[in-house]
């Protein structure tokens, strides 16, 4: 790339990240009201008895999904795959994998979902393919093929990389990014995740002239890759999809620690997308909303990995596991919120009015909330209250609405032994529908199931919880109804912590939009807690959701006194 064009895109990207760009949320209107439901398709519902979930299974359950109060689906990859990384190793981006059905089934799914007012988003694995993808097989053959420059082919491991590991935060590649190959073309290719996932070539932020394989981001190969990605997007949008969650979105350009070049690539793709599909949404797995917002994404996650994570609320470390002594949402009450609060408020203030932050209830890479001794209905209701009363966009991971349990001791299923969370299989077990065989997931024999169903006789199921007014499922429905009807609790409503960040139990925050005000009190600890907050000038505080026996709210002239019972949550409407 020429020097002056680098300077221009750098200036644009820096201005965008530092907030000098337009402070306007340009997401389509529907996105401000979106509540997502994430489906891991192999585990949701098997309609043909082969032990693996499929599209018809999802269609059969759309009425249930709608009944939760969500309005948008996001599917983990359903494209043709070798399944060495749960479908994130795609062999053909233009076809639905036969285990799930056909492209025609996908169109039917979209039609049936749209009939019910549900939107459908797919997973765009933009950064890499399977090593069995036809593009890679062709690229391997040599430098003069149609797909030659779709991948990166170093002729050696440079000295300055030797002995270094890929930096998980900045994405700067290390020796472990070089995969040895006997392709004949070159001794190495660059991978993105597993060895079987060669990175697509979007170029390098600052190509080293001594490294012939490092191309600028606007070289013909990287530009062809971008066009291919736009083709893939158009192909599925034209079949009725409503948008994409982009996998490892920040990883596209190599050796781009400040992410300015990756932002530039996505600015180009997202501008094209917004012009062509103004009703489409773009969600990133970037975990840095400031950056992803500048790149043109409408929603980004703060979850288990990256610098901006929510790990201290739920886990022992970034990408870790539930640990009662340090997780805030643990009944022992030993956690803190400061670490998360600082990360969150930095991002919240920087992206407000521009894009949405999502704090997902879980996903296919994270340990489920129901883990260890965080396993009672009350505990799960407190966490659900948090997720569904925060600003931004809620994402409910399938099964979290009934409190499905994280399963321990599972084997490595299709690459589930991840790099950060080792036992991803534990969060990918079959959805529990009812008390019939395999909890209603499949008629297959136990050993043919994608993963085993929770064996606990008291396992939660949709059928049981649907009938029980006090269930987590019905609580989730109640919270979503409240959220839908309240500007304050919506994605755009203001958020302010009113309790002391250094006295974390209970956590009390105010949501507001004009005169509409809600106060949320969360006490995950098994000790009842009292707190006093600066008077919010309240005439009446009406409990709208949560525990109605243990909590109280007493407005005062100077201070308001709040009492939160052990392991309880309260959502008050303030007038
Ligand atoms: C993302 C996905 C994860 C996958 C990885 C590589 O982090 O969420 O499941 O293994 O990317 O594609």
Image: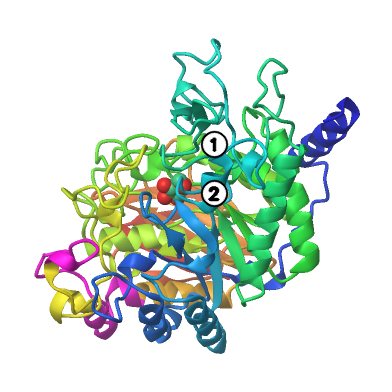
Colour basis: rainbow
Counting labels gives 2
Q: Is residue 436 above or below residue 472?
A: below
Q: Secondary structure at mark 1?
A: helix
What percent of the width, then of the height, locates residue 347?
62, 43
What percent of the width, then of the height, locates residue 169?
52, 31
* Left or right relative to 197: residue 216: right
Q: Nearer the viewer, residue 343 or 278?
A: 278
Could you tell me if residue 487 is visible in this image?
Answer: no
| Residue bearing the label numbered 2 | 285
Which residue is the extreme one toward the left?
Answer: 457
Residue drawn where x is 24% and y is 82% of the image: 463
Q: Is residue 567 above or below residue 208?
A: below
Mark 2: few/some/many CA within 10 Å (<14, 14-19, 20+): many
The boundaries of the magenta stretch are 447-474
What percent of the width, then of the height, locates residue 321?
29, 41
Whether the magenta-drawn stretch holds residue 465 is answered as yes
Question: Magenta region, mostly helix, strand or loop?
Answer: loop
Q: Secondary structure at mark 2?
A: loop
What percent of the width, then of the height, locates residue 285?
54, 49
Residue 342: mark: 1
Mark 1: few/some/many CA within 10 Å (<14, 14-19, 20+): few
Residue at disc 2, CB closer than 8 Å to ligand 1: yes
Whether the magenta-drawn stretch holds residue 437 is answered as no
Image quadrant of residue 328? Answer: top left
Residue drawn where x is 23% and y is 71% of the image: 51
Which residue is the extreme one toward the right?
Answer: 4
Q: Is residue 137 above or below residue 117?
A: above
* Left or right relative to 315: residue 164: right
Q: Nearer the viewer, residue 529 or 394?
A: 394
């Amino acid at each position: 790339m020429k020097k002056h064009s680098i300077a221009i895109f750098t200036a644009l990207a820096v201005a965008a990240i530092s907030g000098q760009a337009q402070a306007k949320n340009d997401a389509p209107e529907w996105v401000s009201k979106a509540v997502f439901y994430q489906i891991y398709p192999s585990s949701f519902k098997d309609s043909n008895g082969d032990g693996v979930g499929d599209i018809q299974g999802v269609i059969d359950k759309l009425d249930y999904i709608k009944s939760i109060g969500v309005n948008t689906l996001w599917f983990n990859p359903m494209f043709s795959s070798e399944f060495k990384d749960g479908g994130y190793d795609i062999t053909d981006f233009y076809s639905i994998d036969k285990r799930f059905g056909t492209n025609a089934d996908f169109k039917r799914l979209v039609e049936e979902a749209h009939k019910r007012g549900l939107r459908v988003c797919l997973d765009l694995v933009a950064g890499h393919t399977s090593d069995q993808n036809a593009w890679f097989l062709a690229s391997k053959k040599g430098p003069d093929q149609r797909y030659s420059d779709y991948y990166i082919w170093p002729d050696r491991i440079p000295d300055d990389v030797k002995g270094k590991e890929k930096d998980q935060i900045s994405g700067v590649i290390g020796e472990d990014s070089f995969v040895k190959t006997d392709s004949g073309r070159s001794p190495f290719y660059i991978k993105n995740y597993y060895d079987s996932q060669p990175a697509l070539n979007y170029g390098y932020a600052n190509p080293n002239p001594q490294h012939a394989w490092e191309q600028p981001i606007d070289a013909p190969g990287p530009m062809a890759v971008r066009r291919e990605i736009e083709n893939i997007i158009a192909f599925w949008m034209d079949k009725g999809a409503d948008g994409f969650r982009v996998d490892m979105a920040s990883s596209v350009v190599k050796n781009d620690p400040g992410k300015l070049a990756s932002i530039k690539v996505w600015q180009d793709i997202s501008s094209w997308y917004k012009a062509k599909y103004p009703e489409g949404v773009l969600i990133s797995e970037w975990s840095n909303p400031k950056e992803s917002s500048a790149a043109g994404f409408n929603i980004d996650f703060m979850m288990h990995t990256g610098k901006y994570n929510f790990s201290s609320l739920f886990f022992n470390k970034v990408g870790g596991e539930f640990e009662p002594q340090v997780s805030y949402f643990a009944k022992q009450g030993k956690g803190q919120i400061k670490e998360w609060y600082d990360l969150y408020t930095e991002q919240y203030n920087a992206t407000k009015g521009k894009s949405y932050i999502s704090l997902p209830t879980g996903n296919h890479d994270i340990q489920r909330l129901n883990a260890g001794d965080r396993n009672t209905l009350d505990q799960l209701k407190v966490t659900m209250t948090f997720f569904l009363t925060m600003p931004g966009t809620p994402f409910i991971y399938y099964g979290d609405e009934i409190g499905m349990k994280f399963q321990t001791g599972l084997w490595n299923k299709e690459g589930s032994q991840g790099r950060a969370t080792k036992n991803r299989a534990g969060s990918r077990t079959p959805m529990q529908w009812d008390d019939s065989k395999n909890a209603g997931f499949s008629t297959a024999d136990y050993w043919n199931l994608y993963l085993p169903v929770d064996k606990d006789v008291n396992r939660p199921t949709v059928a049981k919880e649907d009938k029980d007014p006090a269930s987590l499922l019905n609580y989730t429905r109640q919270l979503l109804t409240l959220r839908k009807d309240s500007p304050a609790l919506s994605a755009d409503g203001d958020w302010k912590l009113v309790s002391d960040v250094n006295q974390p139990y209970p956590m009390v925050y105010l949501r507001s939009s004009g005169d509409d005000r809600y106060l949320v009190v969360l006490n995950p600890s098994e000790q009842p807690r009292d707190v006093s907050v600066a008077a919010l000038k309240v005439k009446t505080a009406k409990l709208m959701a949560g525990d109605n026996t243990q909590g109280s709210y007493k407005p005062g002239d100077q201070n308001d006194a709040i009492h939160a019972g052990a392991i309880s949550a309260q959502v008050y409407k303030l007038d």
